[in-house]
Every structure is written in structure tokens, then in C-alpha cells.
Amino acid sequence: MSGARLCVAYSGGADSTALLCALAGLRRRQRCALRAVHVNHGLQAGAGAWAEAAAQQARAWGVPLEVVDVVVPRERGVSLEAAARAARYAALAARLAPGEWLLTAHNQDDQLETILLQLVRGSGLRGLAAMPERVPFGAGLLLRPLLPWSRAELQRYLEAEGVRWLEDPSNRDERFDRNYLRSRVVPALRERWPAVAATASRSARHVAAAQAQLAAGLDRLLDVALDGPALKLAVVRRQPPAVRRALLRHWLLRQGYPSPDERRLEELAGRFLQARADAQPVLRWEGCELRRHDDRLYAAAGPPALPPGVPLRWPWRARRALALPDGAQLRLLDDRHGDVALARLEPRLQLRFRAGGERLAGPGGRRALKDLLQQARLAPWQRPLLPLVCAGEEIVAVPGLWVAPRLRPGPGEQRRARFVWTPPRAVAG
């Protein structure tokens, strides 16, 4: 911890006050940089006064505090709790400096509530592992150092230190699931099993260890099943049904896509994979779209955007990278083994997109662009978005697949490059 840069998510409540109080006392001995961020959701009439009280307490300890106002979106099907949490974490991640640690004040009681929430939602291993003590976050790390302590222990610490804290009135609103558990369910559990928070946390650690072992095994299996961004379905089909479902979830998670619900996962692991070889089925849910091609599975963030209807100018000498309207990028990278002779490349290029019937010039005659794309096994939904590099009306390069013979370097040519197309996330797989 010595020399670390710490940022505390400080609400002003008992838990985060205990955390900031302890760190304010430790920072000199540990020679840490310490600051705090207060996220104001603006959901209560007294939110402004709450932020000012948090700032006043931070000043008393000599801790710099930033108040961040956020707007919590009201989305259909998303609870206010979830929307506020997402807005809060997004604001915190955006303000975390590279290598900085964000510390939150989640405690043992919070962990119990999280486990219960995951249980009633029917979560799998990842959900039942609840909150990890340490996880990559933003440009740094997120740490939860208070998970071993109960809420009562933290309040006793503050009382011993003579430090007051704020009570959030919204914590008594039982319309929120966590508050309902806190006021109705957890007291009944604790009356029967006083150590329930500690034992539930221990169970969560066991689940987390099992999840880590499972993830390691699935990573090894993915090393065999991956073909670039796509998943080889022949490998997936060889797995038992339970492993097949876990592998599909893990593959989506690694790419940052939301996991499907049980119904869609069953369809994906069954009927979707067993469709005839020439079929091109599509399976969609919020934030993800799956397609099949050439016995490969591709994930995307959504349906492909339409390519621009007019050519795009590209003065490549002024800028080697060109952002395309659909979110893709085309770059011309220096490469001593590249297939483009820079000395022969026109200074002003254009990018066009397929309209049908394009042909490519070569020493043995002209060949159809369509044949090249099929031989390259490019997915049908990607083909309209692949930019064609042109000099006037002539196609001189198809990025990553073909370069006109007149641009290919001869023996001894030093200034070489290659075109690299990075497709948009909506079609990248």
C-alpha cells in the first residue's frame, strides 16, 4: 500500500466515513496519495446539502474531494437502483487516473445482501460469488477493503473516534430491493443465525474460487475453439450440454457482451447450433447479436450500419488512420514486409463500398471481387462494409486481402506498408 494513489468513493454515510477516516489516519505512515469523490445522483431534495456535508467532513481531514453531479436515466425495465448504480460507477471510472485505486466501503452486511439478491434473481456462479475484494476498474483497480467487517463494527469504530456520519433517508425506502432485505429479511436471518453475514461471505469466497477454476478451464477450451474473433462450432458441439452453455457464456463475457437469458441460451446451445450448414440464423437480445457463417459463430453489438453512400476522400500522407462513419477504422501502417510500395501509391485515395459487379485487375486478367471475398471466408454481413481503396475509378487494394500488382513492392524496395481494416464492433464478431 505504501506509495499508492487512493481514491475513496465517499457518500458521507457511516461505511464510507469509516473508510475515509481510517485512510486519513494511515496516509502519512503509508505515504499514500488520498482523495475522495462524492457522486450526487440528484434523486433527493436534500442531495445538495448531503454533498456539502460530505465535502465539509473531507476538508476537516485535509482530504481533497470532488463532487460529481450525474443524471440517472430512467429506462424501461431497469430499476432506479440499478440505473443509479450504473451512473455512479461510470462517473467513478471516468475520473480514475491510470494506476489509481478506487476504494469503496462495501462491508460484510452489504455482501450478505448482494448474495441474497443474486439468489432471488436466479444467478449462476458469477453472481453468487458476489462482490470481489479486488477487480480491475477503469484505468486502475477497485478495492473493497471493508468486506471482512460488519456495519455495526464500522459504526462502533466511528463512535470511538468521535466522528459523526450522515443517514441517507432513502435507505428506509422498502420499495428498493436491497432496503427491503436490510430491514425485513436480514434481521430475521440474524435472529436465528447470528453469524449469517460471515458464513454467507465465506460461501461467496468458495463460489468465487470455483468460478475462477471454471473460468481457467473454459479459457483453455476457448484457446482451441477460437478462430480470430469467431467461435468454431465443431469444437462447441463436441462438448457436453452443460459445458457447451458455460463455454458460450464465457466467450460472450470475454468479449464484453451481455449474457443471454436462459431461454435464449438454450436456443443458442441447441437449435441455433444445429441449424443446417447453409443457414444463416440470427439470435438477438439487448446489447448483442449472434450470427453463423462457415460453421463459425460471430457476436456483434447490434445490426450492421449501412455503409456511406458516397466515396470518402483519404489524403493518406496527412493522416495514416481514417475513422469511418460506421465506427470502423482504416489504417496504413509502415511494415518492412508490407505488400504496398509507398512510392507508387497515389497521394489522394478514395474509399468506396461494394455496389456489385466490381472486378480487380491482375496480370492474368480481371477477377470478380465477389470471388475474392468468398475465398477469404468473409462473413456476408461484413462484405458490404469492407472499404475498397481506390485511385480514381480503379480499385487498388482490398484491405488485408488483395493489392493491385502495380503497387506491390519489388526487390530491394524499403518503404513498404500495409492496409489494416478494423471493422466496427457491430460486425466485428
Image (tube, rainbow, N blue to C red):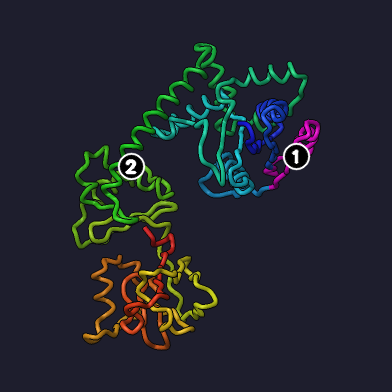
Residue lying at 33% horizontally and 34% vertically, measured from the top left: 214
Between 2 and 356, the one nearer to me in the picture: 2
Residue that mark 1 sits on = 64
Determine the CA span between mark 2 and mark 1.
42 Å
In the displayed orientation, state which residue is furthest to the front.
412
Residue type of the residue flagged with mark 1: Pro
Residue 362 in picture, x, y percent from top left: 26, 84
Between 336 and 90, the one nearer to me in the picture: 336
SS of the residue at dot 1? loop
Residue type of the residue flagged with mark 2: Asp
Up the image or down, 301 lies above or below 44; here it is below
Task: Please provide the residue range marked out in magenta.
Answer: 40-69
Up the image or down, 277 lies above or below 70; here it is below
Residue lying at 50% horizontally and 11% vertically, measured from the top left: 192
Residue 164 in picture, x, y percent from top left: 76, 24
Up the image or down, 380 lies above or below 117; here it is below
Give the number of the disc on residue 249: none
Q: Is residue 82 magenta?
A: no
Residue that mark 2 sits on = 219
First in sequence: mark 2 or mark 1?
A: 1
